[in-house]
Image (cartoon, grey):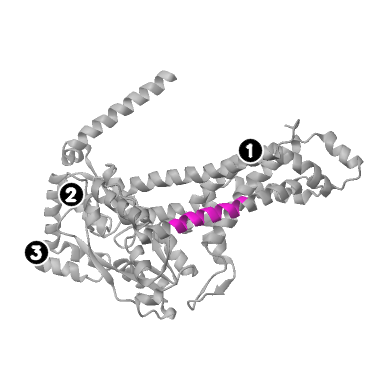
Amino acid sequence: MDFIFEWFRTLYSETGVNLPFIYDEYDRKRMAEGLLTTIWLSLICLFFSVIIGVIGAWLQGSSLKWTRRIVNGYIQLFRNTPPLVQLYFFYFAIGTLLPRVENDWGGTSPMLGSFAWAAISLSFFAGAFNVEIFRSGIEAVPKSTVEAAEALGFSRLQIYRDITLPLAFRVVIPAMNNNLVNLVKTTTLAYAIAVPEMLYEANQIWSDNVNVTEMMIFLLLAYFVLVGVLVAGMNKWERAMKIPGFG
Amino acid sequence: MKFKILKTIAVTALISSVSVTAGIADILDTIKERGTLIVGVKADYKPYGFLDSSGTVIGLEPDLAQDVADKLGVAIEYVPVVSSNRMQFLEQGKIDLMIATMTDKPDRRKVVQIVDPNYYSSGTNVLALKSLGLKDWNDLNGKPVCGIQGAFYNKATSQNYGAEIVAFKGTAEAYSALKAGNCAAFVYDDSAIVAKTNDPAWSDYEMPLATIDDAPWGLAVGLGEDNFAALMSEMITGWHKSGRILELEKKWGVTNTPFAKEMHDKYK
């Protein structure tokens, strides 16, 4: 391994192409941690945003007026505000209003840190879109299918879980893919509240080494590969879920 | 419509080619022709460059920039910059001159033309709650420490003293994160921290550690702008000679720094 690192160090001194996140041990470690943070944050947000979408779409069809109103209010609030503003709002406004806890350096700090707020905020942001996406899928399920299930004595939850949702899911996958791809890219905004993800670490590295061009190219490729993996996975899943004769 | 777009593209191309040739010509001529000197300064770094209540950029460095504009006999325009974009702004020609609390480093001299002699100097210290009782830099080990994205001492603070750096875009965010208790301390330039500890709203906070990395600040012009650099070099020497820096420190409520005094004695 050291041989490769040295090669990149020579590359810098010979050609001026500076990639310290390969040859410098400290920069390498923080870039790797940045990548892991991005992946971890993305996975958490992907999971919770889909859960929010599924539950939200179900509650939207509720017979209770106020449940529907609250869900719609949530969608309007999170869909109509920029995600960066939401992050700042959660971290700097809500974060300081919450009860404080003792920390291990002898002071008190807010209950939730920047990573937790980023996960919460981005999940709700993408979740708001997912609710609408799932609603479109549910509305695509023929009314006659639902009526047939009702005639067979299925409850509302059973119809949603066993009839509507599985069919709707297949309809919404392309639209959901779009939203989830966007979500992964939106995780870069978390650097504004100091979540040490890839953009944050790259920014620090290019400030220390003045190698903006190299870092920009690396970042672009890194996200291209990261999102590519997600899209490939989702496409595979979409094919696996395919029902002959439907959709 | 299509024709209009084409026209716009053609005009844009023409303008950019003109500005490229202007870049090859002397920047001093460009500034005089334009009638304005565009200077990149900090807008979040009290008292060196910050916004007053009406949103105008003021401070010690804008005052220095004003001196340059007066000397050239042109108007002045301030462009607020931050640590992570200031050199790029100068490289791209968005600003003519950068006086933005930048530490003079060899690798930065490869990207922009830093003018000798240095006009100012500062070191690194932390702002922390008095109740934490920090004594030594090693006390920061394992603690979250707020910082500014792009500051060169972030790496040193975490590498040498084991602090976990939590870096924000601007000082406003870092100060509010420190107040909220998201970090144990805020690592920053001692010159700015001194000003903060004099602020009654920050009376519970102190600058407890020994200043490290005392390093000179450099103002910079674009690479290859030798005439402008020569003029600026003359200006800086003049500032040191006349005691202008000491005078401005007094004006903005900074205790006269050893560096400014030393330079004044040297050039007097």
Left or right of residue B178: residue A179: right
Mark nearest the camera among 3 and 2 is: 3
**x then y, percent, for residue A57:** 72, 46
Q: Residue furthest left?
A: B268
Q: Residues within 10 Å of mark 1 (few under 14, many from 20)?
A: some
Q: Tell me the kind of residue under disc 2.
A: Asp
The residue that appears at 76% across and 51% down in the rendered structure is A67
Q: Tell me the kind of residue under disc 1.
A: Ala
Q: What chain letter is assigned to the residue under label 2?
A: B
Q: Quadrant of residue A96?
A: bottom right
The residue that appears at 48% across and 45% down in the rendered structure is A223
Q: Secondary structure at mark 1?
A: helix
Give the dominant element type of the magenta stretch: helix, strand or loop. helix
The residue that appears at 44% across and 80% down in the rendered structure is B131
The span picked out in magenta is A32-46
Q: Tell me the kind of residue under disc 3.
A: Tyr
**x then y, percent, for residue A182:** 55, 43
B43 relative to B74, above or below: below
Asked whether residue A151 is drawn in magenta, I would say no
Q: Residues within 10 Å of mark 2 (few under 14, many from 20)?
A: few
B125 relative to A231, above or below: below
**x then y, percent, for residue A184:** 54, 47
Residue B82 in sight: no
Foreground pick, B151 / B243: B151
* Residue on which the image places disc 1: A175
- Mark 2 and mark 1, same subunit? no
* Residue on which the image places disc 2: B70
Contact, mark 1 vs mark 3 (Cβ under 8 Å): no
